[in-house]
Amino acid sequence: MPLQPRTSRSPFSRSPFSLLPLAFVAAACMATVASAADLSAADAERHAQATYREYFELLSLPNDAIAPEDVRKNVDWLEQAFRKRGFTTQQLPNDGKPMLYAEYQGADPSRKTVLFYMHLDGQPVVPAQWAQKSPWTPVLKRKAANGGWEEIDSAPLFSGPLDPEWRVFGRASADDKGPIMMMLAAIDALKAGGAQPAVNVKVILDSEEEKGSPSISKVMQAHRELLRSDAIVIHDGPMHATNRPTLVFGNRGAAKAALTVYGAKVPLHSGHYGNYAPNPAQRLANLLASMKNDEGRVTVAGYYDRVKIAEADRKIMAAVPDDEAALKRRLGIAKTDKVGANYQEAMQYPSLNVRGMAAASVGDKVANIVPDKAVAELDLRTTPDSDPAYLGQLIQTHIERQGYHLVKGEPSDEDRARYDKLASFSYQSEGGDAAGSQIDSPVGQWAYKALTGTFGTQPEPVRIRMMGGTVPTAEIVRVLPVPFAIIPLVNADNNQHAANENLRMGNYVSGVRTVYGLVTQPF
Ligand SMILES: [Zn+2]
C-alpha cells in the first residue's frame, strides 16, 4: 500500500512559506529550528531518480560475504559514493571483509551524533530460482494484468515521470543496499539545498550481517572512539505491512534447549511390557504439558515475571494496525494463544516452543514397542530482561519439581536403580540476544518527531515495541550503550532473503524523505 496522503495534517505544520505573510514566514522559520526540515515528495523523487544509475551499479556487485573479494568490491564502490558526497571514510579491517565507516563533513560538537547502521552484504542466491537473467543484473518490473510481475525497459527509471508502484528486482535491492542509496540521495538533497544536518552523521556498513554479524561487536569495539555517538539508527528490515512509517525499538533473542526422558534400557515388546515398564514418550508428553496451559501460557514458575510493560506502551501496541482476522485466516488457526492481548503484546514475552519431538518411529517404520527414550527440542525466544540462562534455569527447576532426576548424557545403571524418573536437559543461546530500547527514550522521541514532521500524524507512525524474530541488534548496540531505533524503509513484501527480492520505488522516495527528516531533526 502507498503511504497515506497527508491531507489531514494541521494546515500550519508545513504550509508553503510563499503563500504566507512575511512576518509569519519569519516566525515559522524560527520555529523550524526545533523540527525536521521537510523535503517535498517531488524534490525527494528528483534526488532519488538522480541516484538510480548508481543504485543499479551497486546492485550489479555480488555481495555474499562468503566471498571476501566481492565484499571488497562493494566496500570500494561505496567508499567512493560516500566520499564524493563529502564524507570522510575509513575501511575498518575485518579479516579480509572490511566494514565501511563514513562521517559527514562539518561535525559540530554542539550537536548530537547519530550512528546509522546498514549492511552491504546480502543473502546467497540460487540464480535458477529468479525470474530474471541474473540476481546480479537488476531489472525494472511492473505489476502485470495477471497479478504477477513483468519486466519492462528500465530506461524510464532514469529520466521522465516515475511510477511509485514500479519495483527493482535484484539481490540486496531492499536488504540492504536500497536504504544505503536512500541515505546517499538524502544527503544529495541536503547539499543541493545548501542545508546543514541538525545532527552529526556517522555511518557504519556491516559486511557480514547476513552471516549473523559475527564480527560487528569486535570491529566496533576496536573503533569505539571513532563510532562514539548519542544514538544508533538501524535501517534494515521491512516496514509494517501497511507501509506506514515504522519505528522498531527491539527484538527478541533466541535460545535452544534439549530435553530427553529415559525409559527402560532398550525398546521393549509392548505386549509383554505394556502396563509394566513406564513409557518415556508418554512421560515426555506429560512433562511438556505441565509447562504450558491449554491457552498457550507458559506455566513454568516465574517465566513471565520479569516482563514489565508500561500502560503507555500497551496503548501504542494496541494501535499497531495489524489485521489479526486476516492473519488468523492466513495461518489457518481459529484461536490464538492467550499470552498477550494482541499480536504485538504476545511478542513482548519470552516463548517456550516445542520445535520437534521424537520417540521410536511413526508411519511405515512403526513397531509395537515401548520406546527406551523420548526427545524434545525446544526453542526459547528471549527478551532483554529474560535471557537464556534465566529461562533455562527456570525450566530446569520446573523439570526437577516434577520429580525428575537430571543426568548428563545417558543414565548409569546406578542412576537407573535409584531414580524412577530420569531425564537430561541442556540449554544455550542460539543466534543472538534480545535487545530493547524505550519507546520514549530520547532517540525514540527524536525519530518520532522526524517521521511525523515529514509524513504527519494521520495516520501515526507504527511503533513496534519489540519484534518477535531475532536480528543482530544486540551485537550492534552492545559496544555503544546508547538508545537505538530500528527504522525500516522498505516494503514488507520485498522477498527479503528469498528469490526475486525487490524494492518498491515509492519506498525509495519515501525512504529518502525519512532519512532527510532524521538528519535535519535536532536531537
Ligand atoms: Zn538486512
Image: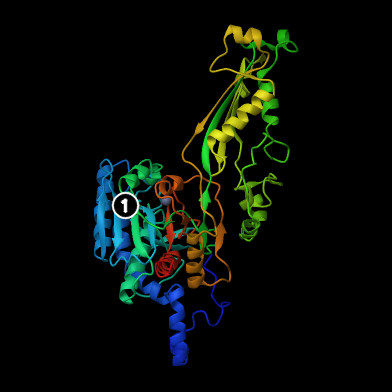
**Left or right: 49 as drawn, with respect to 410:** left
Q: Residue at x 66, y 52 (%)?
A: 342
Q: Where does the C terminus fall, quadrant-wise?
A: bottom left
Can you tell which quarter of the image residue 380 is in? Answer: top right
Q: Where does the N terminus fall, quadrant-wise?
A: bottom right
Count residues near mark 1 (Cα–Cα under 10 Å), then give few for <14, some for 14-19, many for 20+: few
Q: Nearer the viewer, residue 203 or 131?
A: 203
Q: Nearer the viewer, residue 435 or 320?
A: 435
Residue of label 1: 225
Residue 81 in the image, given as x and y percentages of width and height: 27, 61
**Left or right: 203 as drawn, with respect to 330:** left
Residue 146 in the image, given as x and y percentages of width and height: 52, 60
Mark 1 falls on what kind of element?
Answer: helix
Can you tell which quarter of the image residue 489 is in? Answer: bottom left
Q: Residue at x 68, y 26 (%)?
A: 287
**Left or right: 389 as drawn, with respect to 76:** right
